[in-house]
Image (spheres, rainbow, N blue to C red):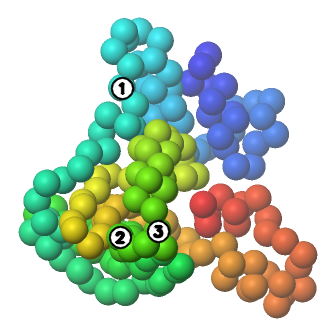
Amino acid sequence: PLFWSMIRKEALHSDGSRVPDWISFATLEVVLAKVLRRVRNKYTKLKLTRAHTVTQNVRKLKEEYVEKGFLGQGCFGRCIWVEHATTRHSYVCKLISKDVSTPVEEIHAELDIMKQLDHPNVLRAFEWFETDTEFAFILEVAEGGDLKRQLAEVRLQGHTGLTETCVRVVT
């Protein structure tokens, strides 16, 4: 019952009252992960959270990851594409410089929040590095582009906002 009710809820074009005729592999993957998480939480005494798996890497960033390009820059730092040297998986590295304009306590607070978040619509942090001059957070890649660009495109087409289907792709 749990699995099928979650399938109904997750299916994009379902009204939620019946099991859809077919589901995509991505939907199956999302629902299966949710079901397994619920079963794990119900039957295990050890409660593992994201905070237990996001750890500080004591090696140097350049020993673990290869820089692949610049993504963007904000008030407190910049983001770059990186590739894991061994697995060749792509990630985003958020680099935050340690200077007087950025209190170290705020950086630690941001990291603590990222470590605790476990939601499919929030970027996941995998590990972090610290040097004398900066912090580096290794983050999940967000596929589908950014929300600002998507909103600009639909406004050019004369629409007032994004459809639910489009938002699911962006997030």
Residue in view at x 31 percent, y 65 percent: 135
Q: Is 113 drawn above or below residue 66 in the view shown?
A: above
**Circles 2 and 3: CB distance less than 8 Å?**
yes
Left or right: residue 59 compared with residue 127: left
Q: Which residue is mark 3?
A: 102
Disc 2 from disc 3: Cα separation:
6 Å
- Mark 2: which amino acid? Lys
Residue 20 shows up from this direction: yes
Task: Please tell me which residue is depicted at 74% across the width and 49% down the height of the picture.
Answer: 13
Q: Which mark is residue 24?
A: none
Residue 152 place in picture, x, y as percent? 75, 85
**Can you identify the residue that label 1 sits on?**
48
* Three-letter amino acid code at the position of disc 1: Leu
Residue found farthest to the front: 100
Secondary element under disc 2, as helix, strand or loop, is: loop
The number of numbered badges drawn on the structure is 3
The residue at which mark 2 appears reads as 98
Specify the amino acid type for callout 3.
Thr
Using a 10 Å C-alpha cutoff, classify the residue at mark 3 as few (fewer than 14 neighbours), some (14 to 19) or many (20 or more).
some
Q: Quadrant of the N terminus?
A: top right
The foreground one among 28 and 133 is 133
Q: Above or below — where is 24 with respect to 70?
A: above
Question: Which numbered disc flags the more N-terminal residue, 1 or 2?
Answer: 1
> Could you say where residue 153 lies in the image, as x and y percent from the top left?
74, 85
Q: Secondary structure at mark 1?
A: loop
Residue lying at 55% horizontally and 71% vertically, measured from the top left: 144
Cα distance between the residues tagged 1 and 2: 31 Å
